[in-house]
Image (cartoon, rainbow, N blue to C red):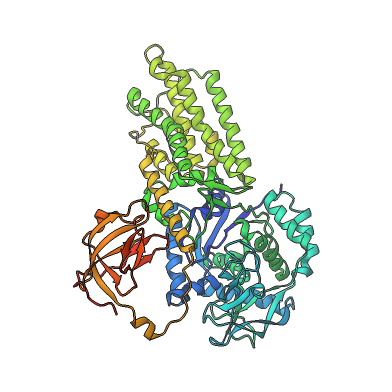
Amino acid sequence: MKEFKRYTVTTALPYANGPIHIGHLAGVYVPADIYVRYLRLKHQDVVFIGGSDEHGVPITLTARKEGVSPQKIVDRYHNIIKDSFEKFGISFDIYSRTSNKIHHETAASFFKSLYDKGEFIEKTSKQFFDDAENQFLADRYIIGTCPKCGAENAYGDQCESCGSSLSSDELINPVSVISGNKPVLKETKHWYLPLDKYENWLKQWILEEHKEWKTNVYGQCKSWLDAGLFPRAVTRDLNWGVKLPIPQAENKVLYVWFDAPIGYISATKELRQDWEKYWKDSETKLVHFIGKDNIVFHCIIFPAMLKQEGSYILPENVPANEFLNLEGDKISTSRNWAVWLHEYLEEFPNKQDVLRYVLCANAPETKDSDFTWKDFQARNNNELVAIFGNFVNRALVLTHKYYDGKLPQPSEITQVEQEIREEVFRIKSSIEKNIENYKFREALKDFMQISRIGNKYLADTEPWKLIKTNPERVKTIMYYSLQLCAINVILSEVFLPFTSLKLRNLLNMGKTDWEDVLKFDLLKPEHKINNAELLFEIIDDEKIEKQLNKLEKTKKMNELSEKTIDPQKEEITYDDFVKQDIRIATILEAEKVEKADKLLKLLVDTGVDKRTIVSGIAEYYKPEEIIGKQVCVLINLAPRKLRGIESAGMILMATDQDGSLKFISPEKITQNGSVIS
């Protein structure tokens, strides 16, 4: 395996039109942070690059919906995202943004370099145009009926109901999102990257030279290459984005898929004057951490761009993860079906590492996985509290009890201690192998083995009993237990950085690096440790039920929003309308109609008279609840008999989205007989 002098590690740039959720964290940012923290502990030269993707149609749609500028939207969400990452401990060297001047300059220069080399194909084609707004429509600016499932309001690039990828010309009855008008086809010129031209090189580079890539990544790349590549547009007709640095290209910007990955380069330029050695030196290892929806862009398109530009290195690996689901359902920002990071940080203060642990333990490394709040609770209580926290707490408490918080001088070292040392050495080697091969779930299991070994060591030797008969042996046991705790400080710095810092303070430890894991004298005899504190707390059922109720409420809201509103009835004239005599009335009496589950018999005071009305509201109201209620009554409706009772009028009701009926009532007590007009 090739040795590298330095590392450039990038993470997918999240769209700045919404906050970060656990799917982003599990798929990209937690594994990337583990990898970088490991490299830093090994004193590797590494830059960790992140930033917000602030261009693209979703942002302009959000801005139009809210009636503000796109810059207002990206400013808001960039700050939310950046703040959330910092509080969660994602240790970027820089978290930049693609609206920065340096990015616009870098992306425009990259395009110009390929343009000057004649790499692009210029093509004129017909695209949808909104005459009323005088602008071409990107795919997300067009909605219509999905040709595959028949759902309304499918976008020009995707139907969110069935998940099918679409093109805008496939939509049935397409309309402009902006004006609501039917768009027309109009000619426009764009520049295309001829991916088919690079197909043979890509097959050799990926399928032959990078067989070590994760199976899900390699498989998706092979599928794309086997199907054949086609030229792909790199420009769009929009006002928001990186302007084209060529003449006769007004109102055209770089397509977001082209400009966003260049954001890794521009962020590095912003971070360091010597940025080129991280992007143009063959002794630098470039690694992209992304989700599965970005595989084609980072494994096929961006490498093709870098290759044709000619001066950049190519990614050595792209360890993309699959998707994380939530409680058995796909995470969806549009349906608010997510656990948002900024909300989690507020609702679970000082529990960043619990979420980091759970997301790593259940990471969707080769297939989709599922986050559930019950699993979150179980992993915290049964693993972090009962294994890691329990071992550390017992070791610290016993040291204070027997030695006033000072490390004892060990006596005889037995075969038991020798086996523990050998097992720790094996675990260190396994963690290294797993992290370097992007198997973070396995590395986390290795890490937890240290605490399992410690717990077993204490349980087998029982120093609380042995102290009475063999106090010298107990000195060795406690000395080794505390060395295991110190090793946990180093290892947890990779996986659980907040816990590492807390444990380091408890042990009163100085600076350490990765190779110190091999030492069993990190803490010297007579070293004074601080009083024991719990590393983790039990998460009770009430806290979890609150989160489940929150999701259940979201689910119900989504179900209601999916219900269709009844269409408008046929048109009537004003004369038809004024024939209706609708008055305010008060319900005086109410009782159920025998052998009729849905009917109530009401006596109402209409101001004109007191009359009986039979109404089908028994499913929604109990008789005793509505006596004295003011309602609206149509009083000039011809009487009719219902269950043998003459009903002289109709109570006006509204049908809610869930199908229930609700009274239409005045805001304040109103005189009976008042006319509704």
Asked if residue 576 is positioned above or below residue 331 in the image, the reply reads below
In the current view of this chain or complex, which residue is farthest to the top?
469
Judge left or right: residue 223 versus residue 485: right
What x and y, as percent, mark residue 550?
40, 52
The quadrant in which the C terminus is found is bottom left
What x and y, as percent, mark residue 587?
23, 63
What x and y, as percent, mark residue 508?
38, 38
Q: In which quarter of the image is residue 502?
A: top left
Q: Can residue 519 be seen in this view?
A: no
Q: Is residue 460 visible?
A: yes
Image point (36%, 58%), residue name: 643
Asked if residue 422 is positioned above or below residue 489 in the image, the reply reads above
Total label count? Answer: 0
Judge left or right: residue 19 versus residue 405: right
Image point (72%, 48%), residue name: 212
In the current view of this chain or complex, which residue is farthest to the right?
200
In the current view of this chain or complex, which residue is farthest to the front?
644
Residue sitting nearer the eye, 331 or 274: 331
Image point (66%, 84%), residue name: 188
Q: Quadrant of residue 140?
A: bottom right
Residue sitting nearer the eye, 305 or 125: 125
What x and y, as percent, mark residue 534?
36, 36
